[in-house]
Amino acid sequence: MANFPTDWNIDYYHEDAEPEEHWELRQAFMKFHKGKFSEEYLVALSKTFANIEFLGCIYPDPLMAKIADLSKDIVKKYRVLKAKRLQRKFIAGSEAARQKK
């Protein structure tokens, strides 16, 4: 695997409107893989990773497999925390009314 420059600042890519949780996971992704890819490509991969993880986006199978492989060690902690959070359950209004009786 080629070595790429690592003298660039990851924090430069923190977007103002990006939720902190998203940034922390994307930042961890970039830190873990810095030097393995070019700066531009790694930033693009990190955004793709975030889109998949937070927005449920789907990309062509080869890219999905690549992101899954690159993120497997990074996303474990996040998914454990996510699973422990309050989960919302949507039900029909008629069911809610029936349960209220």
Image: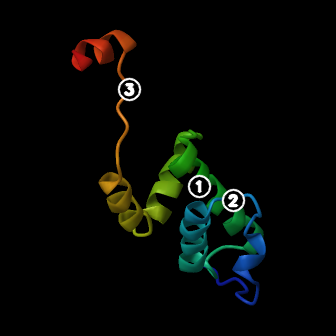
Instruction: State the image coordinates of residue 46 (x, y, percent, origin top left).
Output: 63, 62
| Residue pictured at 62% horizontal, 79% vertical | 34
Q: Label 3: state its secondary structure.
A: loop
Identity, as a three-letter code, of the amino acid under mark 3: Phe
Instruction: State the image coordinates of residue 44 (x, y, percent, origin top left).
Output: 70, 60
Q: Nearer the viewer, mark 3 or mark 1?
A: 3
Cα distance between the residues tagged 2 and 3:
27 Å
Identity, as a three-letter code, of the amino acid under mark 2: Glu
Q: Nearer the viewer, mark 2 or mark 1?
A: 2
Give the numbered dot on residue 50. 1
Q: Quadrant of the C terminus?
A: top left
Residue nearer the viewer, 6 or 55: 55
Cα distance between the residues tagged 2 and 1:
11 Å
Judge the density around disc 1: few (<14), some (14-19), many (≥20) Cα neighbours within 10 Å.
Answer: some
Give the numbered dot on residue 92. none
Give the numbered dot on residue 90. 3
Cα distance between the residues tagged 3 and 1:
25 Å
Looking at marks 3 and 1 on the same chain, the residue that comes earlier in the sequence is marked by 1
Looking at marks 2 and 3 on the same chain, the residue that comes earlier in the sequence is marked by 2
Instruction: State the image coordinates of residue 14 (x, y, percent, origin top left).
Output: 72, 69
